[in-house]
Amino acid sequence: MANRYLHNVQGLFDTIAPNYDRMNNIISLGTHRHWRRQTMAQIQLAPTAQALDLCCGTGDWTIAIANDLQPTGEVIGLDFSAPMLKIAQQKVNQANVADRVWLRRGNAMHLPFHDNSFDLVTIGFGLRNLPDKPQALAEIYRVLKPGAQLVCLETSQPDQRLIKPVWQWYFTKVVPFFGRLFAHQYQEYSYLQETTRHFVSYRQLVGLFEQAGFQAVHYQRFNFGAAAAHFGTKPSLEDAHD
């Protein structure tokens, strides 16, 4: 069941890849770039770090991480959509960071990396599309080095009484309409708004992080709660032995 679901979602992202960046700008009114900059500002990353950007899509966050690295550092961008990765590679080349970026096709729930490999793992707007979120978080925990951090930037759900109805109207009515108007892909963007509406709350996501073993879990909310960045740290070896 999970494999079939993942195959269907992969097909969806293959389809929307050519319009993905433009539609992100339209749907978020450009604010997704601000969310990522604000999130990046809170990440302490050594210039020689080994980083992994999961569900990297067209590579914006991968490139942002690469810009903070020296050539001796590396960021791997992993995604299951070949068309997304093709666009990402073009953007990596244009950004002149190909010497520290490796793009790879793969499944975020079954990572093809050794235990304790990365100083940082990021996942932006991808966790909600994975059928088994605890499995994905367990895999991220496995490949992180002790003391290293997971950073998840994701759409979220406002809980303010006056804001929530507006947010629900926007995602249920306006987002699919934009998909039809600007990309001729009503069904695809109808699905994406459903994943946004039905994703766990920011508080529930804290619980999923903690269940996976992450410590010092905290979050920052954006745009009255329309998005949230969650941070969690894999315990250091000293903490693990306490």
Image (spheres, helix red, strand yellow):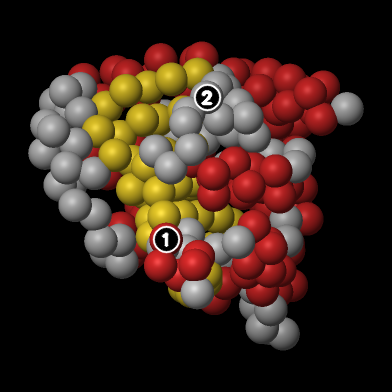
Corner quadrant of residue 237: bottom left
Q: Secondary structure at mark 1?
A: helix
Residue located beneath label 2 in the image: 112
Disc sitting over residue 128 in the figure: none
User: As drawn, is 133 to the left or to the right of 74?
Assistant: right
Q: Residue furthest front?
A: 241
Q: Nearer the viewer, residue 224 or 51?
A: 51
Of the 4 image quadrants, the one containing the N terminus is top right
Residue at point 61%, 19% (across, down): 15
Corner quadrant of residue 149: bottom left
Q: Nearer the viewer, residue 225 or 162?
A: 225
Residue located beneath label 1 in the image: 237
Mark 1 and mark 2: Cα distance apart in space: 23 Å
Q: Residue furthest right?
A: 1
Residue at point 54%, 44% (across, down): 142
Residue at point 46%, 55% (across, down): 150
Tell which circle, 1 or 2, labels the residue nearer the N-terminal end. 2
Label 1 environment density (alpha carbons within 10 Å; few <14, some 14–19, many ≥20): few
Tell me where residue 163 appears, x and y as whole percent: 65, 77
Q: Nearer the viewer, residue 149 or 61?
A: 149
Tell me where residue 4 appears, x and y as whole percent: 82, 22
User: As drawn, is 238 to the left or to the right of 194?
Assistant: left
Q: Nearer the viewer, residue 83 or 30?
A: 83
Tell me where residue 67 appears, x and y as whole percent: 18, 42
Q: Amino acid at mark 1?
A: Leu
